[in-house]
């Protein structure tokens, strides 16, 4: 599969409030490159038909991750406190398994990691996302992270802390609040992933091959609107 230089619609380059989710993020003076990623599944080369932007709710992730070195920046509080963070931008195929593990090199540079650490506060995850997903849609790590950051910075993310205090919160409530803040989306474009017990884990935002919001496929949409939803505040 040929990897192309990617063009993102200018409308998506308008800054939103995604970075406000990184509360007082401070990039450390010294960052070490993580170990090279280990390929955990078979290489798949397929035409890219659409994309998924996976946006994690960090307090839920960190509930079970504190003390683990690989997630130290995200969960320890050493460089800041995080609400929503970017898990990754994933190319998807029209049918069958998604493109993945197209190349392990070139690896992201220290500057690539430094530039994107407040968006994705885990160097090992930045490296993994490039190798598993980005290498199938961009020529360089910097090119992949640029597209991901444009999409990320275009978002106006919900106030999840405020929503968490709403009685009777449902999946539909979160989707409606996201759409209210991001008019280009519909509720069908906002997939959700919940942890055991119905806690918010991720938003799975669906885009077409031109990076415009599109309805999620059934397997990526997640719980229906009436499903009760809980949001962990990290207390």
Image (cartoon, grey):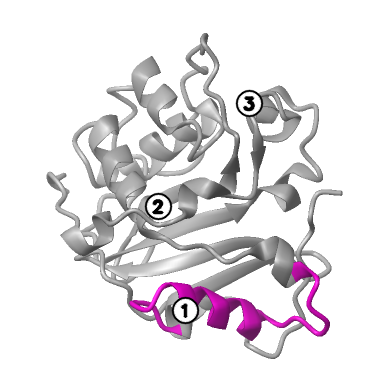
Question: Which image quarter: residue 169?
Answer: bottom right
Question: Which image quarter: residue 97?
Answer: bottom left
The residue carrying mark 1 is 179
| Disc 1 secondary structure class | helix
For mark 2, does the 10 Å Cα neighbourhood hold few (<14), some (14 to 19), or many (20 or more) residues? many
Q: Position of residue 213 (x, y in %)?
A: 32, 73
Q: Which mark is residue 152?
A: 2
- Residue located 79% across and 55% down the image: 233
Q: Position of residue 144 (x, y in %)?
A: 28, 40
- Residue located 71% across and 71% down the image: 163
**Left or right position of 221 against 199:** left
- Residue located 65% across and 32% down the image: 80
- Which stretch appears magenta? 164-186
Q: Is residue 169 magenta?
A: yes
Vertical side of 210 occupied by 128: above or below: above
Tell me the distance, in whole angstroms, between the alpha carbons under discs 1 and 3: 30 Å
The residue carrying mark 3 is 79
| Disc 2 secondary structure class | helix
Tell me the distance, in whole angstroms, between the alpha carbons under discs 1 and 2: 15 Å
- Residue located 69% across and 23% down the image: 78
Q: Is residue 1 magenta?
A: no
| Disc 3 secondary structure class | loop
Frontmost residue, 195 versus 62: 62
**Left or right position of 59 against 136:** right
């Amino acid at each position: 599969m040929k990897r192309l230089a990617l063009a993102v619609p200018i409308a998506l380059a308008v800054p939103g409030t995604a970075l406000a989710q990184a509360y007082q993020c401070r990039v450390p003076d010294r960052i070490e490159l993580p170990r090279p990623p280990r390929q955990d599944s078979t290489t798949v080369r397929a035409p890219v038909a659409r994309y998924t932007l996976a946006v994690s709710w960090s307090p839920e992730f960190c509930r079970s991750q504190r003390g683990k070195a690989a997630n130290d920046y995200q969960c320890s509080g050493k460089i800041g406190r995080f609400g929503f963070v970017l898990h990754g931008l994933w190319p998807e195929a029209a049918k069958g398994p998604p493109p993945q593990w197209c190349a392990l090199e070139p690896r992201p540079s220290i500057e690539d990691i430094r530039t994107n650490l407040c968006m994705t506060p885990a160097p090992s995850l930045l490296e993994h996302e490039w190798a598993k997903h980005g290498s199938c849609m961009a020529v360089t790590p910097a090119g992949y992270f640029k597209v991901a950051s444009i999409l990320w910075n275009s978002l106006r993310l919900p106030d999840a802390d405020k929503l968490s205090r709403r009685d009777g919160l449902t999946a539909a409530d979160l989707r409606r609040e996201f759409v209210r803040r991001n008019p280009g989306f519909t509720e069908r474009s906002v997939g959700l992933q919940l942890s055991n017990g119905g806690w918010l884990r991720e938003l799975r935002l669906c885009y077409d091959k031109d990076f415009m919001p599109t309805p999620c496929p059934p397997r990526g949409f997640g719980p229906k609107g009436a499903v009760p939803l809980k949001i962990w505040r990290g207390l």
